[in-house]
Image: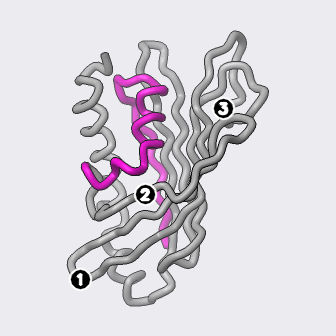
Amino acid sequence: MPTHKEIRVVPHSPQQLYELVADIEKYPEFLPWCVAARNCSREPTADGELVMADMVIGFKMFRERVRSKVTLHPPTDGEGGSDGEGGAGAAGTHGRIDVEYIEGPLKYLQNHWVFVPTDNGGCEIDFFVDFEFRSRLLQKIVGALFHEAVSRMVAAFERRATALYGPAGQ
């Protein structure tokens, strides 16, 4: 499957964007093709949280449940630099969300979001996704629309951020 990597700068803070992406259960309210979403379990880690989440994706007659392990590393403030990895022990780490495929119609899924503060109080979003369906038919259908679909999903998050936080991320 082709991968999609995108970097966008938005006027909202890294904390706001992190909270938006981490709020998985709200995805059906704004995310295209997301019919349902729920957190199955949630447990704290040394530097964030580990969430097991189910998402039901629907498009026309296609409807599948995908279970993922979502590792949440919230942004932290601090003096000095940051390691850019969202890891524990770094002073002022960027927020990071990693998604790992557990169960469903895919062969694999790799996805991450990194939220880097900008000098003007906004956020640079580093988004990456790569996945492949087990079904060759679904793979062929999705493959033709992959980049357009992913761009629509990223744009949906941007619109949601504007709706929640205002156009300048107040």
Distance from disc 3 to disc 1, alpha carbons, whole Å, reads: 41 Å
Residue that label 1 marks: 61
Q: Secondary structure at mark 1?
A: loop
Q: Residues within 10 Å of mark 2 (few under 14, many from 20)?
A: some
Q: Amino acid at mark 1?
A: Met
Q: Residues within 10 Å of mark 1 (few under 14, many from 20)?
A: few
Distance from disc 1 to disc 2, alpha carbons, whole Å, reads: 22 Å
- In the image, residue 23 above or below residue 32: above
Q: Amino acid at mark 2?
A: Arg
Residue that label 2 marks: 38
State which quarter of the image contains the C terminus: top left
Q: Name the front one of labels 3 and 2.
A: 2
Q: Which residues are magenta?
A: 1-29
Earlier sequence position, callout 1 versus callout 2: 2
Residue at 45%, 88% in the rendered image: 135
Q: Residue 2's spot in the image, x, y percent?
A: 48, 68
> Disc number at residue 84?
3
Earlier sequence position, callout 3 versus callout 1: 1
Residue 117 vs residue 95, the one in the foreground:
95
Q: Secondary structure at mark 3?
A: loop
Earlier sequence position, callout 3 versus callout 2: 2
